[in-house]
């Protein structure tokens, strides 16, 4: 049988142009480590730490290490620690299956420390991503359906959206010239406590601008003192100490109907100005009269 001559097999060379095309194709589906570092806004040491941890595939092309793009994107979608400088948010796949303790706490309007305590006490399941514990969504929903103490907030806001309609407890205290602790007591244990609409978001207590305004109108002890114009604007809504109130507001403060307030007006129980729909009651005088009326 005739055997092929393979004595020169070591001298066989791949066509340089073919070798170059293969290298270009491999390069297209990869990026350099410096490119990955710039994409995530990292320093050199941290970028090589990610490579060392083998979160995504790498390969050597032309003597240099490169990051496999498909592998990188899959890793990016399953973590939330690192974010692209310009690009989509991280964790697209992770967020479909789990909550961070902060996100779950925001959903319930409570502090995340309280939720940690519940999870530890009841020994509920968690997962760990980048050394941070998370709650599987199905575990959270199962727990939620089998308890009666907590309810999900009706509206979900971003922080920017929240600031349009709410004022932080700290900012509210500053406006009134009192401590945050003092305002906290007022919202929890004073006769005005039911007037406040409170929610916790990112571990801070927030008061709705509308309920804060009601509180200002309902009493004369606490007023806005840290604003030259005695008003502050957060977003598009303005909170201020009013000098005048309408009949409907007076009725709400007194716990009566507007017809009763109209009757009081006819009896000249307190001063007012205007007529008809433009009629306005002097707020301070009304509250003073109301206090005496209820105390009689």
Image: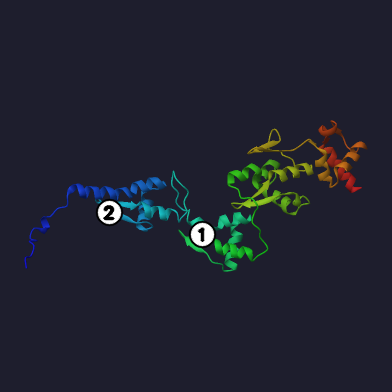
Between label 1 and label 2, give the one nearer the viewer: 1
* Labelled pair 1, 2 in contact (Cβ < 8 Å): no
**Closer to the camera, 94 or 171?**
94
- 216 w.r.t. 107: above or below: above
Left or right: 289 as drawn, with respect to 116: right
Left or right: 201 as drawn, with respect to 72: right
Left or right: 29 as drawn, with respect to 224: left
Q: In the image as oriented, which residue stretches furthest toward the front?
A: 1
- 72 w.r.t. 165: above or below: below
Q: In the image as oriented, which residue stretches furthest toward the top?
A: 274
Q: What is the distance, in whole Å, between disc 1 and disc 2 at their CAs?
A: 34 Å
Residue drawn at point x = 83 percent, y = 43 percent: 251
Q: Quadrant of the N terminus?
A: bottom left
Task: Residue 24 in the image: state x and y as whole percent.
Answer: 27, 47
Residue 253 in view of the camera: yes
Residue beneath disc 1? 97
Left or right: 136 as drawn, with respect to 110: left
Query: How many neighbours does mark 1 have within 10 angstroms: few (below 14), some (14-19), or many (20 or more)?
Result: some
Q: Secondary structure at mark 1?
A: helix
Query: How many neighbours does mark 2 have within 10 angstroms: few (below 14), some (14-19), or many (20 or more)?
Result: few
**Closer to the camera, 259 or 3?**
3
Task: Residue 40 in the image: state x and y as whole percent.
Answer: 41, 47
Rendering colour mode: rainbow
Checking the image for residue 85, the label placed there is: none
Q: Earlier in the sequence, mark 1 or mark 2?
A: 2
Task: Residue 64 in the image: state x and y as whole percent.
Answer: 27, 50
Number of numbered discs: 2
**Closer to the camera, 153 or 238?**
153
Residue 110 in view of the camera: no
Checking the image for residue 60, the label placed there is: 2
């Amino acid at each position: 049988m005739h055997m092929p001559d393979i004595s020169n097999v070591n001298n066989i060379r791949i066509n340089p142009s073919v070798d170059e095309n293969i290298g270009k194709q491999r390069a297209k589906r990869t990026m350099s480590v410096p490119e990955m570092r710039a994409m995530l806004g990292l320093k050199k040491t941290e970028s090589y730490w990610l490579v060392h941890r083998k979160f995504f595939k790498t390969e050597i092309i032309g003597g240099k290490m490169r990051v496999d793009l498909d592998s990188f994107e899959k890793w990016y979608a399953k973590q939330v620690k690192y974010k692209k400088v310009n690009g989509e948010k991280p964790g697209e796949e992770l967020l479909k299956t789990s909550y961070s303790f902060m996100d779950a706490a925001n959903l319930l309007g409570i502090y995340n420390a309280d939720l940690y305590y519940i999870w530890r006490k009841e020994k509920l399941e968690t997962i760990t991503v980048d050394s941070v514990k998370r709650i599987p969504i199905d575990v959270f929903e199962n727990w939620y359906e089998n308890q009666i103490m907590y309810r999900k907030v009706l509206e979900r806001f971003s922080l920017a959206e929240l600031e349009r309609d709410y004022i932080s407890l700290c900012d509210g205290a500053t406006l009134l010239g009192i401590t945050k602790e003092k305002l906290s007591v007022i919202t929890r244990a004073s006769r005005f406590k039911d007037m406040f609409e409170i929610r916790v978001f990112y571990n801070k207590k927030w008061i709705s601008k509308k309920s804060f305004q009601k509180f200002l109108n309902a009493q004369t002890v606490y007023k806005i003192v840290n604003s030259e114009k005695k008003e502050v604007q957060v977003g598009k809504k303005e909170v201020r100490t009013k000098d005048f109130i309408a009949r409907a507001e007076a009725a709400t403060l007194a716990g009566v109907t507007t017809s009763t307030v109209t009757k009081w007006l006819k009896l000249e129980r307190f001063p007012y100005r205007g007529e008809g729909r433009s009629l306005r009651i002097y707020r301070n005088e009304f509250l003073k009269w109301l206090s005496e009326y209820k105390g009689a």
